[in-house]
Amino acid sequence: MKSRLFLGTSGTLPKVAVINIDDPYGVKLAAEAKTKVRTVTYGENPEATVRAEAVNLDFRSTTFRLVWPGGTAQVESALIGRYNVSNLLAAIATAWGLGRNPADFLSRLRGFKGVPGRMERIDEGQAFNVLVDYAHTDDALRNALGMLRTITPGRLLVVFGCGGNRDRTKRPLMMKAVQGFADFAFVTADNPRNETLSQIFDDMKGGVSAPEKIAWIEDRRRAISLALDIAKPGDSLLIAGKGHESYQEFADTVIPFDDRQVTRELIGIKALK
């Protein structure tokens, strides 16, 4: 139980309990915790100690007014999606709870671009949004695409595949998740390992509901290239599955392949045409 971390039932009480009260369980937990330990709450909830107001989400940035007991400030971040508002607030609330003044480090948050390979933006001056993410399960794809769907004014495009020598039952589920949100998907190789792409593709086809919204492209570089070709201003392109990985695994070899590097190269080549 997470409550053990805050209530001291597994050992020593923490110096401070930092709890999200946008979540109903968090409200209950905070009420319990404050009877035993200093508690700092955070969220968009107007009762939160550290809170976000006037939140603005778009497909390239996030802004909100930060309010804490010592003041207010405008926060600008390259991190996108409502869950990153929560992540930013958690970091700020923790620092404030340990005695730091948010005004002293907000500039650092503005410059923080996120974790490599996790919703990492590829910005080479193109008119559309390109993100590389490690999402490689149906749940992760659903969360990533659901977030992008809410902040993308244009179409949502996806390049993804399923790894070989892994759970085959999740392949149609991954396809179903993508088809539930994407306007068009390029299905391609992930890390095939010792399986054939034809076998992987056949398994994925069990989740197809709109075949006209899919292109099956075996070569991952070509799939990314084709996706870039059809992307227009206002669109978001998610290249999913490999994230920070800098290689691709086949049956008897591992080759260099970094989605981020390949995408930058392709954008540069297309800009010269």
Image: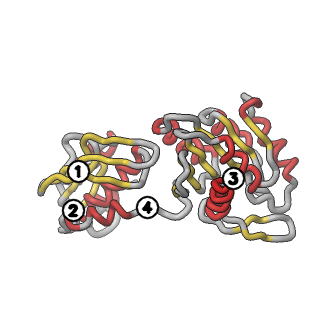
Dot 3 or dot 1: first in sequence order is 1
Do the residues under discs 2 and 4 have CB atoms within 8 angstroms?
A: no
Give the alpha-carbon distance from disc 3 to disc 1, as whole Å: 44 Å
Give the alpha-carbon distance from disc 1 to disc 4, as whole Å: 19 Å
Quadrant where the N terminus lies? bottom left
At which x and y percent is residue 163? 74, 55
Mark 2 lies on residue:
102
> Is 64 on the left or on the right of 81, as rendered?
left
Q: Secondary structure at mark 1?
A: strand
Q: Secondary structure at mark 3?
A: loop
> Is 269 on the left or on the right of 44, as rendered?
right
Neighbourhood count class around disc 4 (C-alpha, 10 Å): few under 14, some 14–19, many 20 upward: some
The answer to which quarter of the image holds residue 142 is: top right
Dot 1 amino acid type: Leu
Dot 1 or dot 4: first in sequence order is 1
Work out whether residue 185 or residue 19 is closer to the camera in this orientation and state it. Answer: 185
Residue 7 in view, yes or no? no
* Circle 3 or circle 4, nearest the eye: 3
Dot 3 or dot 4: first in sequence order is 4
* Circle 2 or circle 4, nearest the eye: 4
Mark 4 lies on residue:
113
Work out whether residue 259 or residue 146 is closer to the camera in this orientation and state it. Answer: 259
* Circle 3 or circle 2, nearest the eye: 3
Mark 3 lies on residue:
273
Residue shown at 34%/64% (left/top)?
A: 10
Dot 2 amino acid type: Pro
Dot 2 or dot 1: first in sequence order is 1
